[in-house]
Amino acid sequence: MSKVALVTGGTRGIGEAVCIALKNAGYKVVANYGGNDEVAKTFTERTGIPAFKFDVSNFEKTKEAIDQIADDYGPVEVLVNNAGITRDGTMHRMRFEQWDAVIQTNLASCFNTCRAVIDSMRANQFGRIVNIGSVNGQAGQYGQVNYAAAKSGIHGFTKALALEGAGKGITVNAIAPGYVDTDMVRAVPEEVLKKIIATIPVGRLGKPEDIARSVLFLVGDEAGFITGSTLSINGGQHMY
């Protein structure tokens, strides 16, 4: 029987690539999205993957939606926390609303989704959780104290939850992508983007499929001995 996989922020960019890779591998995939109904509709028409609209930063709405997904498709056995936003600004100009929106959407959402699936994973003695961090959570980035803090928090969250889940058949890992060719990155001014690419030893942006292949490996049965790890996929931009 196909395992049920939920991918947050799953209708475009990295999330879309992850959804397609999981579906092609035989998983029963459900995508989450937060706002763009037209993009979600096109995504579902193109892929056949259902898309559920709910705000991952809202604990109650997230629980309600995941309960509905479990009723419709079965309990979530594979969870990919990919949803994320940016609200960039240097500290002396950043408003609290910019800080709070990023922390809630990028980091608190991981608690919200994991809390909603952890009981069924523990009961079934199986679960795969992959949290999408960032190279900027490892190395920092000018003008992104909110984003870097949230993504760095994901890496610590991953390790702690991995310790809790290990004895229950649940693995929890993170992926820290570098700069990937998505709408979010392409929104960066061209001159800034050229400077970023110049810092990447392989000389290009990553592709969403680069991340999707790694997610597919980490959620597979063959990766059952890997937990609490962060896999850096950044073209050599940051090594440690």
Image: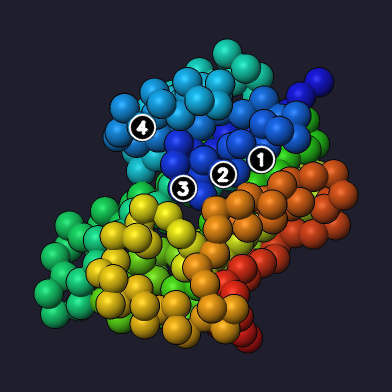
Quadrant occupied by the N terminus: top right
Q: Could you give the CA–CA distance between mark 4 and mark 2, rounded to whole angstroms?
A: 14 Å
Q: Within 10 angstroms of label 4, few (less than 14), some, or many (20 or more) residues?
A: few
Amino acid, disc 2: Ala
Q: Could you give the CA–CA distance between mark 3 and mark 4, rounded to whole angstroms?
A: 11 Å
Q: Could you give the CA–CA distance between mark 3 and mark 1, rounded to whole angstroms?
A: 13 Å
Residue 17, numbered label? 2
* Quarter holding residue 48: top right
Using residue 157 as the reference point, say whether residue 86 is left or right of it. left
Q: Where is residue 219 in the image (x, y as percent from the top left)?
A: 74, 46
Amino acid, disc 1: Ala
Q: Could you give the CA–CA distance between mark 1 and mark 2, rounded to whole angstroms?
A: 6 Å
The reply to whether dot 1 and dot 2 touch (C-beta < 8 Å) is: yes
The reply to whether dot 2 and dot 3 touch (C-beta < 8 Å) is: yes
**Residue closer to the observer: 55 or 125:** 55
Helix, strand or loop status at disc 3 = helix
Which residue is farthest top? 72
Using residue 164 as the reference point, say whether residue 115 is left or right of it. left
Helix, strand or loop status at disc 1 = helix
Helix, strand or loop status at disc 2 = helix
Using residue 127 as the reference point, say whether residue 71 is left or right of it. left
Residue 39, numbered label? 4
Amino acid, disc 3: Gly
Residue 21, numbered label? 1
Is 40 drawn above or below residue 164 in the view shown? above
